[in-house]
Image: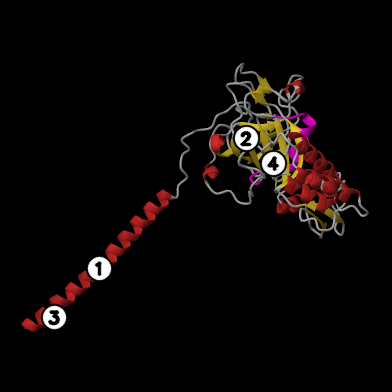
Amino acid sequence: MARVSFNWISGRFRINSLYLVVALVVFGAVVFILFRGHGGLPQEASAGGTVHEANSVRDSVEPASSVANETRPQPGVPSPALSQPQPGLPSIVGSASAPVADSEPNPTVANILSQAIALKQSQPGRIIEARNNLNDALKLPMSLPQRKAVKDEMAKLADDWLFGPAVFAGDTLCETYMVKRGDLLQVIGRRQKVPYEILMGINNISRPESLQAGRAIKIAKGPFHAKVYRSTFTLDLYLQDTYVRSFTVGLGKPGYETPTGIWRVQENGKLIQPPWTDPDTGRLYKSADPDYPLGSRWIALDGLEGQAKDRTGFAIHGTKAPEQIGTAGSRGCIRMFNGDAVLMFNLLIPVYSRVEIVD
């Protein structure tokens, strides 16, 4: 009897031990899941968003793009996505600071510039080789007149390789695409990380719906980026890391300086003449008002790095006061001539296009 009793007690002990082990494993798994879940929650931004000219763009305004999503970040509220790595955002040329300017011309740059002009004028014109050589030259120190000459020549070349209908041999930034049945211009643009409006422009397409299967169209491989120099009120436009052209812009006045750092174009942030309330007077402006201040387009920005980090409420937009372009007169936004704002609207794409602001 003692032996049987001992075996029964030992068996029950083993069973109870098994239950205890299982219970501990389950408890540990629950604790792990709970703590892991809290660790993955978006963190509240400590800096907060600073709202300047954008603080009254209403959510009732429909996005200008027909392919925009339904959810729009609120002006002045940091987006949780800002703390996450941003995909597809290559470095912009000379991203650390403004280019080095020498007082003396650089002979190497002078030689590259003369060779590029000769390549352009050759038969057939070697446009892409000239563009690539000049783009490499921009990384070199040179005098300010030389830098202007290089950029001016590259802007002329962009009229052919980018904004014109031709696709040149050896171009890695533009190519020909044969439209298939069921293709949508909006989808083609998203696939290439460019707005469909630029594809309409370079292919002389009047309406997206008029795209026809079997047609060969020119596509650009995005995204486009912009780099703004506060000291010269200049915005440089790039396709990937290749310079395209420059624009004169207006920036923030004293006390409302445009923050330096890295920004991205806000998801659903491209709007056509949205209503705006002046934060000083409380007056609501609508696009039909003769003194509507925002001009032709609004491109909202989200701050990613530097002074810009986690800040919203800033934008690239047009203006009713073109005389202020090239000066510090805004509440922090980047102002452009209305025609330039339309072009920028047609080139920059939400999430993927970056805007870098340096001194």
Q: Give the range drawn in magenta.
A: 335-352
Residue designated by label 3: 7
CA distance for labels 1 and 3: 19 Å
Residue designated by label 2: 358
Question: Is residue 207 among the parts visible in the rendering?
Answer: no
Question: Three-letter amino acid code at disc 4?
Answer: Pro
Question: Three-letter amino acid code at disc 2?
Answer: Val
Indicate the position of residue 322 as horizontal and vertical percent values: 76, 23
Indicate the position of residue 15 as horizontal and vertical percent values: 22, 73
Sequence-first disc among 2 and 3 = 3
CA distance for labels 2 and 4: 18 Å
Q: How crowded is mark 4: few (under 14 residues within 10 Å), some or many (20 or more)?
A: some
Q: Which mark is residue 19?
A: 1
User: Looking at the picture, does residue 154 appear above or below residue 58?
Assistant: below
Q: Nearer the viewer, mark 1 or mark 4?
A: 4
Q: Nearer the viewer, mark 4 or mark 3?
A: 4
Question: Three-letter amino acid code at disc 1?
Answer: Tyr
User: Looking at the picture, does residue 13 appear above or below residue 309?
Assistant: below
- Quarter containing the N terminus: bottom left
Q: Residue 141 carries which label?
A: 4
Does the CB distance between marks 1 and 3 fall below 8 Å? no
Residue nearest the observer in this picture, 199 or 96: 96
User: Looking at the picture, does residue 326 appear above or below residue 309?
Assistant: above
Left or right, 243 with respect to 300, comes to right
CA distance for labels 4 and 3: 89 Å
Identify the secondary structure beneath mark 2: strand
Identify the secondary structure beneath mark 1: helix
Q: Which of marks 2 and 4 is in front?
A: 4
Q: Residue at the far left: name it.
A: 2
CA distance for labels 1 and 4: 74 Å
Q: Residues within 10 Å of mark 1 (few under 14, many from 20)?
A: few
